[in-house]
Image (cartoon, rainbow, N blue to C red):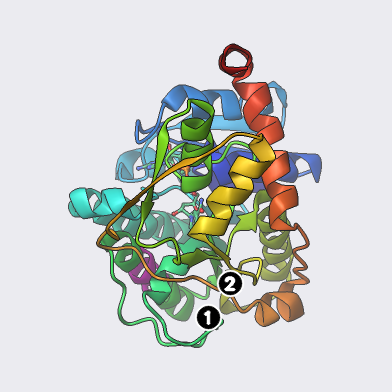
Amino acid sequence: MRILVTGGAGFIGSHLVEKLLAAGFSVDNIDNFVDYYDPQIKRDNIAECLTSANFRLLEGDIRDRSFLADVFDSHEYEMVIHLAAMAGVRPSLEQPLLYSEVNIGGTQNLLEECRKSKIKKFIFASSSSVYGNNPNLPFREDDPVDYPISPYAATKKAAELICHTYHHLFDISMICLRFFTVYGPRQRPDLAIHKFTRLISEGQSVKLYGDGSTARDYTYIDDVISGIMGAVKYVYKNKCYEVINLGESKTINLLDMVNIISEEMGKKVKKEFVPMQAGDVQITYASIDKARKMIGYHPDTDFREGIRKFLGWYYENNKMRYMEDQ
Ligand SMILES: NC(=O)c1ccc[n+]([C@@H]2O[C@H](COP(=O)([O-])OP(=O)(O)OC[C@H]3O[C@@H](n4cnc5c(N)ncnc54)[C@H](O)[C@@H]3O)[C@@H](O)[C@H]2O)c1
C-alpha cells in the first residue's frame, strides 16, 4: 500500500515516514524544505529514508496546484497523511497570510486532489492550539473550539472544518489528530525544549514568558507516532470523520520544564522572566479517552525520561559544540 505523506522531512513527519517504511508501507513524501528553520536539518532527517527503495521524495509546495495535479495524476495512493504546514504559534502573528495560504489553502488543494483521484482516506495534523483558552480541563474533542487566539490556531481549525466538508460531500474518511506539544529527537529548533537546551548549553539566559505557571501537555514523539499509526489502521478500516487528541494527558508547567532540563543537563539555568506573548495559551491538557478507546493509544513516556532521550539525541547531534562546552 502506498501512502502519501506531506511534510515528511520535518520533525514529526520524518519519524512517521521511518515507522511507515518499517511497517512495510511504500511512502511518497511531499516537502518544500521551507526555511522556517534550517532546511539542511530536514534533509538530514530523511537521509536514511532516501536509501529505501520504498521511499520517494517529491520536492514541491502544497500551494502549487499544478505540481500537486502532476503528483496525483502520475501516482496512486490509498491514503494521504497531511502534516505539511507552517507550524508555530508566535511566527503566525507576523505572517498570518502565509499561514492561511499554506495551512488552509494547501490543505484544500490536497483534498481537491483526493476528490479527483477518489482517494478515500485522509489524516490531518491538527493542533491543541485550536482549543484556545478553553476553561474545561482536560480538553475534550467535543469542547467548543470557536475562539482560537492565534492565526496558526485559526488555520488549523479552518482546515478541520474543510476536512469535514470533504468527508460529508465526497465520502472521504478523515481523522484530524490534535497534537499536543510534541518533543523528542529532531524536535524543531524553535520549540521551547530544544531552544532552552541550546541556550542552557551555551550558558545564555532563558526567557520565560509569564510567571512560569503556563503549562503544556508535552507529548513524546514515539507516543505521537504510535497514535498516528493507530489512526492509519482505524481510518483504513472505517468510514469516519473523527477528531482525536494525541497528548500525554499530563501537564508540566514552564518552570518545572526548564528546571528538569537543567537538572538533567547538570547545568545551571539563568532565568529571565518576561511578559506573556500574544497568542500563547495558559494551559494545554488533553483528554485521551477517545484516543485510547478508538485507536488503542497508550502513551507511556514519563517527561523526565523523554527529556533524557531528547538530550541523548541533542548531544550526539551537537557533539563538537558540546565537547567544547565541557
Ligand atoms: N510539533 C508540535 O508540537 C506540533 C503540535 C501540534 C501540531 N503540529 C502539526 O504537526 C505537523 C508537523 O509539525 P512539525 O513540528 O513536524 O513541523 P515541521 O516544520 O518540522 O514539519 C513541517 C514540514 O512541512 C514542510 N512544509 C511547510 N510548508 C510546506 C509547503 N507549503 N509545501 C510543502 N511542504 C511544506 C516543511 O518543510 C516541514 O518539513 C504540522 O502540521 C504542525 O502544525 C505540530
Q: What stretch is highlighted in magenta?
A: 156-162
Q: Where is residue 309 in the image (x, y as percent from the top left)?
A: 72, 40
Task: Provide residue 249's location: percent of width, then percent of height.
Answer: 64, 72
Q: Earlier in the sequence, mark 2 or mark 1?
A: 1
- Does the residue at mark 2 contact the one at mark 1 (Cβ under 8 Å)? yes
Is ligand 1 less than 8 Å from the beta carbon at label 1? no
Whole-percent x, y for residue 267 in the image? 60, 34
For this rendering, which residue is in front, 15 or 32?
15
Considering the image in quadrants, where does the C terminus appear? top right
Queried whether the magenta region covers residue 139, the answer comes back as no
Q: Residue at x 38, y 81 (%)?
A: 145
Residue at the (71%, 70%) spot, across then down: 234
From the image, tell me which residue sits under label 1.
Answer: 139
Taking 310 as reference, is 82 above or below it?
below
Q: What residue type is labelled 2?
A: Asn
Residue 297 makes an appearance in the image: yes
Residue for badge 2: 245
